[in-house]
Amino acid sequence: MRLILVHGINQEGRSEDLIKTEWLDALEAGLGLSGTTKGLDVRAPFYGDTLAQASGPRFSGVVAQGASADTDETAFLAAALSEQAQAAGAGGRAIAAEERALAQEAGGDVAAQAGFLMDRRLNAILRVIERLSPLHGDVCMSLLKQAYAYLKRPGVNNVVDAIVRPVLDAGPAVVVGHSLGTVVTFKLLRQLALEGRPIRVPLYVTMGSPLPLMAVQAALGPAFVIPSGVDQWLNAVDPDDLIALGRGLDAANFTAGIENLSDIRNIPGDPHSIRGYIGDNRIGGAILSACHA
């Protein structure tokens, strides 16, 4: 059985071989069984450079005033970041207080700054998130910029899909996605099924998925169902992973029938890391079992 690994954000400058090595080494280390993935037919379609170029400059910790020319993108970022801030325990009051502070720092003349109000809101939300963890703000913003580019910018999803889809379309496989890779794989598996060409997937693994985000779901569009051909869907989330809102995928926020591992403890300081996800022995064991079945 083939094994397909689909990466997420911030992979520019890397390669398929590097991703395969990183993921498989972490899987083997988690199981304490060196060499267990040797001989597997593994593919890791690499779209990192393509998506990074389409997404614009990498996030550097602040949204410059007037920098977001695409108002749809700005609204998407604000909505998704608000969800993540709330999931981290920061409500609207904290965000509003930060917006007022930013206005005062800018001189307090709200009327003169009217064109920058949405940019200020983004910065306010990011400040709130970054107070919880400096890493969270950077990772969340990077994910959302690349997610928006993939889901909403004309032509970008076609270019990325042209890299990933042929690998999926080549026949039965265990499919493993991380971060934005879960959005890409879900979209393509659903699309192939709707075209009457479902891929047999004995095990579909999603890790650190932003699929619970309402902003992502609105951009992705319905229906939110387990794609035809998928026998088992295993979703893993670290409760501290804001990319996934610290939540599993269930009937309340996505669809029923998905098995969730919601107690993953990722590497210290980086709850979104692929190493802690695929290095969990339950995930690694499930992947190997499905590959050898």
Image: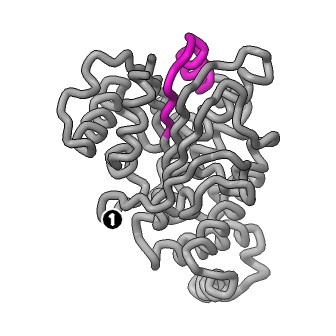
Q: Is residue 44 visible?
A: no
Q: Is residue 29 visible?
A: yes
Q: Position of residue 30 (x, y in %)?
A: 27, 45
Q: Is residue 164 magenta?
A: yes
- Tell me if residue 46 comes above or below residue 127 in the rendering: above
| Side of 86 relative to 203 (left or right) | right
Quadrant showing the N terminus: top left
| Side of 225 relative to 202 (left or right) | right
Element class at badge 1: loop
In this view, the residue in front, 133 or 263, is 263
Q: Position of residue 28 (x, y in %)?
A: 25, 37
Q: Position of residue 79 (x, y in %)?
A: 71, 63
Residue occupying image coordinates x 64% and y 37%? 150
Residue furthest top as drawn: 170
Quadrant showing the C terminus: top left
| Side of 267 relative to 105 (left or right) | left
Q: Is residue 85 magenta?
A: no
Label 1 crowding class (10 Å Cα cut-off): few <14, some 14-19, many 20+? few
In this view, the residue in front, 6 or 155, is 6
Residue occupying image coordinates x 47% and y 49%? 58
Residue occupying image coordinates x 58% and y 25%? 201
> Which amino acid type is shown beneath numbered disc 1?
Gly
Residue furthest front as drawn: 293
Q: Which residues are magenta?
A: 159-177
In this view, the residue in front, 212 or 81, is 212
Q: Where does label 1 land, which residue?
A: 269
Q: How is the image coloured?
A: one colour
Q: Position of residue 128 (x, y in %)?
A: 54, 78
